[in-house]
Amino acid sequence: MTDFSVVGKRRPRLDTIPRALGEAKFSADLGLPGMVYGKVLRSPYPHARILNIDTSQAERLPGVKAIITSKDVMPYKWGVFAYTRDQQLLPLDKTRYLGEEVAAVAAVDEDTAAEAAALIRVEWEPLPYVIDPLAALEEGAPLVHEDKPGNVSVRIFVDEGDVDNAMADAYLVDEGEFTSPEENYCMLEPYAVVANYESTGVDIWCPNAGPHMKARPISNALGIPTSMVRVRKVHIGGHHGGRSEVSPADFMAALLSKKARRPVKLVYTREENMNCVRQVHGARTWVRAGVTKEGKLVGLDFKLIMDGGAYASTGPIAASVAYQMIEETYAMPNLRYEAIRAYTNKPPRGMYPHHPRTTYGGLEMVLDALAEKLGMDPMELRLRNSVYEGYVTPTKTVISSCGQIETIQRAAEKAGWKEKYGKLPPGRGIGMSSSACLIGFPMGIRGGSGAFVRFNEDGDATVISGVVDNGQGNDAMIAAIAAEELGLPIEAIKVVTADTSMTPSDQGAYSQASTILSGGAVKAAAADAKRQLFDVAADLLEANKEDLVARDGKIFIKGSPEKSVSLAKAARTALGRDKAILGRGDRWPKGDHKREWVSNPRGQLASAFSYGTAIAEVEVDMETGRVKLLNMTAAHDCGYPINPLSVEQQMHRSALEAGPAGVMLERHAWTAAGQNINANFTDYWFPLATDVPNIETIIVTTNDKFGPFGAKEGGLSISIAMIGAVANAIRNAIGTTVHDFPMTPDVVLRAIEARNESESGSTTHE
C-alpha cells in the first residue's frame, strides 16, 4: 500500500493558483452578451393564499424585459423521492414561509429589477401559521400542506431487538433531553445563477453539489428533455450540504431567460441566502442508554422532533442519518429510534454533516454520565463498545473496513487524555467522542458515477467525470487516482468535470461518495485505457501484456524496467493503427437496493464507513459561563489517503464546523410572526479566525476493498465526533450536563446555577 508514486503524497489542489491569483470565476462573476438582471418578490407572510397577482405597473417600467408568476409555470412539484414531492419552485396557490418566492423580474440592471418587483401588486389572504415543531404536531394546528395530516413530513421508525426488556435488565440507565435551534450554512459565496435559454436548450451556471442531480428537476419544471438542460462548470464557494438540491433560483433564472430571450443573472442578497435557499434542521432529542456493570451497551432509545420547515426536501434522509451513524459507531443488540420531521411555516431545511447536533452530542453526554456512574474512564467505555470489521448493525448493515479503536487510542495519546482526564483544575475540562460516517448509499438511477479517460497524441490524458469540486479538492483527487492507475505524473492529467452535457452521470458531492464512487469510476476508466495501451505496448516490446507495468510515464516489463516504451509512444502508435485510446468505467454504491429510508430501513446501507474520534479541551469562566476552546484533536480513519494534505484540511474544516460553530455559537432566532431576526453576518454568530484553537490531526490508515486504492472519505466523521467532544469537555469542566445547543455563556451559566442549586438543596434564590 505504500509503493505509490502519486497516491498518498501531499499535493496542492489543482485550483490553488487560479484562486490565489483571482482568476477563478464564480457564478456572480460571469457576464454574457445582452445579459439582464433578476430580482425576486417574496411573501411578507409566513402563510398566505395568493388570490391575485397584478404585474401591470411593473410591466410598464422602462427597462423591464420579463416578469414571471405562477401563471407562467407548470404544476410540477419537486422532491428527492416521489413521496416527498411537495414544493413548487414558484408557488401556484399559496406561500408557506416568510420570504418564499412569489414572482421574479428581469430588467436591464438590478435597481430597475428591484423597482419593478416592488411594483407588483399581490392580493393576499393571510392564513394561520405555526413555527414551532411541537406545536405543529398538536391536534388542531394549522396545516402547512392540506394533504399532510398532522403536519408530519416524515416519520422514521426503527425498532430492532427488545429495547424495553434490555433497559429493564440494564445495570444502569441514563437519559436526557436536548434541544437545538436551526443553523445556517453560511457559505461566503452568495447564491447566484446565470441562465441562458436558447432554442437548443438552457445553459445554467450556479453553485451546486451535483450538476446531474440538478439537471433533471430543472428539466421537469421547464417541461423540456434533460438533454436540453446543461448545468455548466463554475467555481463554487462552499457546500456543507446546503446546495445539494435544486433551488427555486435555478428555475426562476431559466424561466426569466426563456421569457426575456436574453441571458439572466440572479444574485441573492445575504438575507436571501440565509432564508431562501436551505437551512439546517432545528431539533429536540430524547436519548436513553442502558449498560451492563462492565459498561457494555445493552440498548439505545431515541426520539426526535425535527423542524423541517415548509417542504420535505431531503426529509427521509435527513431524519435517518443520525441513527445510522450511531449504530455504525457503537455495538449494541437493541435499538429503537423514532424521528418525526414536522412541517412548519419556516424556510425548508436540508442536509448537513452533523445534524441534528442534539442526537450526537446528547448521546455522547449520556455515555459520559454512565461512565461517571460506573467509575469508568469514558475512553474505556468507548473502547468496550466500538464496532469492528465484520460487525453487523441492528438494521443488518455489515461494517467493512474499520479503524475506530485505533482512532480512539491515537487521539487519546496525542491529546494526553490519561494525563488530563480527572486531573485538570476547576473550570478546565476535557471531552471525547467517537463517530462513524456512511459512505455511498444507493440513490436510484442517479446514485452512481461514470467516467472516461482519453489519451492525447502527446501522451497526456484527459479525465472526464461528472464529479463536482465544492472546495474539497475533488478535481485533484480524481487526477491523482488517474495518474496512479495510468503510471503518469499528475501534471500530465487534465480534468473535465461538472458539466452535464460533457460528462457522464454522477451522484455529486452527496453521501460522502466523491472519492469512493466518482474516484472509483475514474480508476476503472483509467484501468480500461491502460489495458488498451498494454495491447499496443505488448507488440512493441514483444511481451505478454500480463507482464507489463505502467509507471513514471513508461510501460515496461515487470522486473526489467530497461525494456520499456513511453506511454506517449504507445498512444501515438495506437492512433497510427486507427485506434483511439478511450477508457470507460463506472462505480455504483454497494448497498441493498431493497432498503428504503421509511418503508424498509433494513439491509446493507452503504458501500463503506469512515471512523473518527475527537478530543477537546476547554476552559470555562464559572462566573460568566464563557467557554474558551483551548485544543481540538482529531483522528480519522479515511481508508487510504489519496492526498493527506486534503484530508487534513477537511479534518480542520470539520472540527471547526462542529466545535466552535455547532456547539458554541450558531443559531437562528425567530419572532412569533415567523420572522428570522438574525439573517445576516452581523447578528448570526459563527467562528472567526480568533475562535479557532490549536487543531491536531491524525490520519488512521485502513484499506477498504471497495474504495479506490483503499480510500473512503476525508474528514466528515470528525464533524460528527467533535460535537460530542466539545460538549463533553464543557460537561467535564462544570460538572453537569448542558442540555441546550449552542452552549453560549447564558446557557452554560444556567446549567452551572442549576447544578449549584441542586447541590445546595435549594430550589429558589434568596
Image (cartoon, helix red, strand yellow):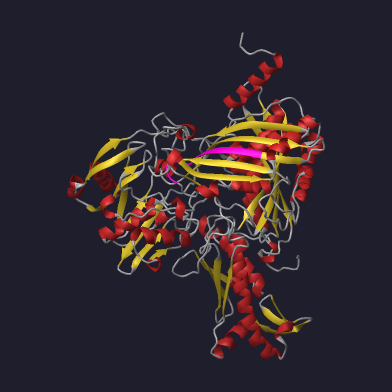
* Quarter containing the N terminus: bottom right
Residue 741 visible in the picture: no
Dominant secondary structure (helix, strand or loop) of the stretch shown in magenta: strand
Q: Is residue 274 magenta?
A: no
Q: Position of residue 659 (x, y in %)?
A: 62, 39
Q: Position of residue 72 (x, y in %)?
A: 27, 54
Q: Nearer the viewer, residue 54 or 310?
A: 310
Residue 199: image quadrant is: bottom left
**In the drawing, does residue 197 fall left or right of residue 617?**
left
**In the drawing, does residue 647 fall left or right of residue 385?**
left
* Quarter containing the C terminus: top right
Q: Position of residue 542 (x, y in %)?
A: 71, 91
Q: Nearer the viewer, residue 754 or 286?
A: 286
Q: Residue at x 50, y 56 (%)?
A: 209
Q: Residue at x 61, y 77 (%)?
A: 528
Above or below 125: residue 622? above
Residue 179: image quadrant is: top right
Question: In the rendered picture of this protein, how many numbered marks are placed on residues?
Answer: 0
**In the drawing, does residue 98 fall left or right of residue 135?**
left
Q: Which stretch did the figure color magenta?
A: 301-311
